[in-house]
Image: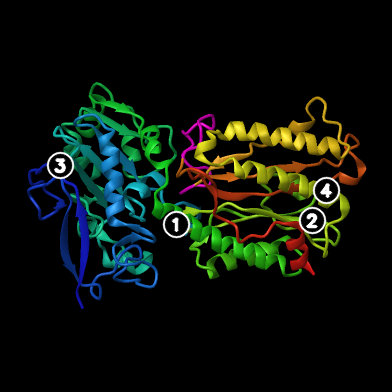
Amino acid sequence: MRYGFCALRWHARSIPQTPGLVRSSQQVFPRIPSRFYASVSATDLQFGQPLHETHPHLLKAGELTPGITASEYAQRRSKLASKLPKNGVAILAASDVKYRSGAVFYEFHQDSDFFYLTGFNEPEAVAVIGKSTVDDDHSFHLFVRPKDPKVEQWEGSRSGTQAAVDVFNADESGDIKDIERLLAQSISDASEIFTDSSPSQSSASAFSRLFKSKPSFSATGLAKLLDQKTVKPLRSILHSIRYIKSVAEITNMRKAGQASGRALTEAMRHSWTTEKDLAAFLEYMFKRNGCDTSAYVPVVARGKNASQIHYVRNDDVLPENDLVLADAGGQYGNYITDITRVWPISRTFSPPQKDLYNAVLATQRTCIALCRADAANSLDRIHQIAESSLRDSLKGLGFDMRGDALEILFPHHLGHYIGLEIHDTPDQSRKAPLEAGQCVAIEPGIYVPDTDRWPVAFRGIAVRIEDSVCVQDEHPLVLTTEAVKEVDDVEALRS
């Protein structure tokens, strides 16, 4: 059986034939996108990631990655090109495979900026997006590992250079091993180069290595060419596009939130004796409910351990009469969710546990309600509101809130942006008013040290409640609502 792979293309100009390049068959590049179909036998050719033609149970027709179409990836590249100067070139490198020891590698995770623009989910690749001198037309080159049956027998399938054109819609492709020569040809006429690779990076990617040694007066080839060009950072430009999520992106995050929320609610129904067992159950349930993997290493912490914000040892026992904090979420189509829930290991909260829990929950409700565009609040402003709410609640519970008390009891920021990363688009200021389409995590918490400074009944108790939220014009959309958090609901699950 043969399959037609749909390629949606925006082309800048016709480029002279270059040795070693695989290129689109179209020579006239219109500004209006046109459909191009390449007939590829899915029975004869395997790819380095799931596609609809090979994994119809995972992707719908037209999707390049779960939930995101080839058309949307093309639109993203077009938006980036519109922000570049005439003849400006953006260069992005894929992530490298990270090794635990020897030949034992970690699970591969693609660079978020590279993935956002290409949908290509393999290492050792470089994307080049060049803006034309004519309007906002642009070209897209994708240099990747070629097909190699012997290597693929050991390491798994690669997509190869032809698929870079036919499937991932590049105008040209080539062997990543020839990147120095191919890249020099791609950027020779560039007015400015935008990239985030630098000599300080530890990356060993084929592209990053080109920046390892500082070009000198005697440099030749690509090094000399780079030395003659204006090189500027790309991240801030790209993140000005990424920070507003599309409908498809929000849908992916909702799927991750729904699956993860259900996993946490199911975990509350069961009795657990160790942090390790609960962590393993959550990671299993994320995948069983439809996520691809965990979004991050889960925090599963009994009372005293929960005061360590990023406690990930997960190796303690869960004694009766204590609380357990689970900060865990799944990932779908590379989009993450971030949730934290706290519940009693026994059947009910003790009165002090319930008092602290309700103080945090009331603050979180207030803060989530403010995550709407018409309120014109920034994350920093909502953080100030959270501080005021928690301070008043703690005073009412008998805490002495003078001096640095609040800084000790609530030591982290209320929230952060989320998307392809847990702390997404870090170049976006938390001082800026929230806009419709932004997604944030809202996570107030109280962590009471076991010291004489604090009321005896509350010492050693830690509570954090976190949800993933999409900002809309008039009201927030909670992406993780399936994870129960009302005291009555939690205790009902524990009975």
Q: Is residue 488 visible?
A: yes
Q: Nearer the viewer, residue 45 or 284?
A: 284
Asked if the residue under mark 1 is in contact with the one under mark 3, i.e. CB atoms within 8 Å, the reply is no
Q: Residue at x 37, y 48 (%)?
A: 116
Tag in front: 2 or 1: 1
Q: Is residue 462 visible?
A: no
- Which SS does the magenta portion mostly show? loop
Amino acid, disc 2: Leu
Q: Earlier in the sequence, mark 2 or mark 1?
A: 1
User: Which x, y percent locates residue 4?
Assistant: 19, 68
Amino acid, disc 1: Thr
Asked if the residue under mark 1 is in contact with the one under mark 4, i.e. CB atoms within 8 Å, the reply is no
Residue highlighted by disc 1: 251
Q: Is residue 423 magenta?
A: yes
Residue highlighted by disc 4: 355
Residue highlighted by disc 2: 323
- Left or right: 202 in relation to 316: left
- Give the magenta range: 419-435
User: Which x, y percent locates residue 261?
Assistant: 60, 61
Q: Earlier in the sequence, mark 3 or mark 2?
A: 3
Quadrant assignment for the C terminus: bottom right
Neighbour tally class for label 2: few under 14, some 14-19, many 20 plus, Cα within 10 Å: many
Quadrant assignment for the N terminus: bottom left
Check the image and report above or below for 348 versus 373.
below
Amino acid, disc 3: Ala
Asked if the residue under mark 2 is in contact with the one under mark 3, i.e. CB atoms within 8 Å, the reply is no
Mark 4 vs mark 1, CA separation in Å: 35 Å
Q: Earlier in the sequence, mark 4 or mark 1?
A: 1
Which labelled disc corresponds to residue 281? none
Tag in front: 3 or 1: 1
Residue highlighted by disc 3: 12
- Left or right: 178 in relation to 253: left
